[in-house]
Amino acid sequence: MCLTFGSVSAQNRSSGGSFIYLLRPDRVFDGETVHAGWVVLVKGDKIEAVGRPAEVNSAGAEVIDLKGMTLMPGLIEGHSHLLLHPYNETAWDDQVLREARSLRVARATVHAQKTLLAGFTTVRDLGTEGADYDDVGLKQAIDQGIIPGPRMIVATRALIATGSYAPKGFSPDIEVPQGAEEADGHDRLIQAVRRQIGKGADVVKVYADYRWGLMAEARPTYTLDELKLIVETAKSSGRPVVAHAGTAEGMRRAILAGCETLEHGDAGTPEIFALMKQQNTALCPTLAAGDAVSQYRGWKKGTDPEPERIRQKRLTFRQALDAGVTICFGGDVGVFAHGDNARELEMMVDYGMKPLEVLRSATAVNADVFHLTDRGRIRPGLLADLVAVTGDPIQTITQVRQVRLVMKGGNLYKR
């Protein structure tokens, strides 16, 4: 059966059926290492066999010739907001306050399709930013085959300390809808965590710091005990907690509380990154978001000198690498255009990582950090989430943009 979604055609293959593909690229990046001349056999929604052609029984398989290409696991976006669109199109405040949720969901369906066609078969979507639990319905629509898109790990509303988040700048007499759920103290935090999990959250996101007041610099929000309570409550249901944390103190509290990943980490220090390494806390640096915001504010990249914010980010990212911190790939896409997720991969190389390390980050590393045991590598028995790109991205990272084949669960969305 062939399902058509606009320009996307998905050839559906049921698990355990007789449909078999043999993918024959120049090389296979299996999520960890590169193998020249390997082939990959797909049956139903799983990878059946991997190896040299003589080692793989491909009887009855439809051969897909990927000459000149590299076959990789489907890429895993670690920090996405499918319900946001670039801030140079519409300011974040206006998206939260002025755009109907129905409009935001309709736009998100297009974002999901663009993400999938760019080779990103899984996204960790870290907050609806004022759209309540609409990420849950978006995930269900994708899972049920109603719309094309990546597999989603959703955080729903996210948690913020009262008075710390946004939109801001209104009269103090006015109660303004917030971009996340306000909760404080023992009982309210437990209720909020359980409520979000009950509504469908796969992961709990907490803002460990933010810009208090109208124009202030970021400062910690929750106490260490509050963060520990959030982690304990989520963990009892098997859910991890991730923390928005940009300040050194906010990062320190989130690490000690047991948050599994820190998002951004802009003002980290060598001591903080050493603590992250010690506690096995991963960093999702979101380089592309800060780069995009700086350009929205007038920086002419490639012409003007780099702003202090960018120079500082280069420094802290280097410090995290030197400390041996696990780096997750995640760009905070939504701040910039969906489908342009590769922007973060390119910047990770520009900021000091080798292309092979970056590709590991976007596949096997993210799978391990996010507890996704069924994907992120090309191995027999794992999901047939695969992407083929022209050339060799291990040598030239920009080749990740040259997507020629996208397969998710054995279904071909681009060929």
Image (spheres, rainbow, N blue to C red):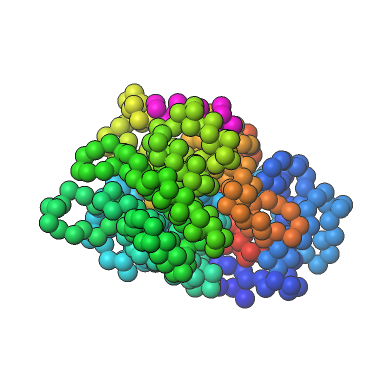
Indicate whether residue 321 is drawn in magenta: yes
Judged left or right of residue 95, residue 385 is right
Q: Residue at x 44, y 69 (%)?
A: 199
Q: Residue at x 42, y 45 (%)?
A: 224
Residue 260 picture location, percent across and down: 53, 47
Q: Position of residue 239 (x, y in %)?
A: 53, 59
Question: For this rendering, which residue is in front, 217 or 407?
Answer: 217
Q: Nearer the viewer, residue 107 or 388?
A: 107
> For residue 214, what is the image quadrant?
top left
Q: Look at the magenta stretch and give its main secondary structure.
A: helix
Q: Looking at the rendering, in which quadrant would you find the C terminus?
A: bottom right
Visible in this render: residue 401?
no
In the rendered structure, the answer to whether residue 41 lies left or right of residue 372 reads: right
User: Which stretch appears magenta?
Assistant: 311-325
Give the residue at the far bottom of this rendering.
1
Q: How many marks?
A: 0
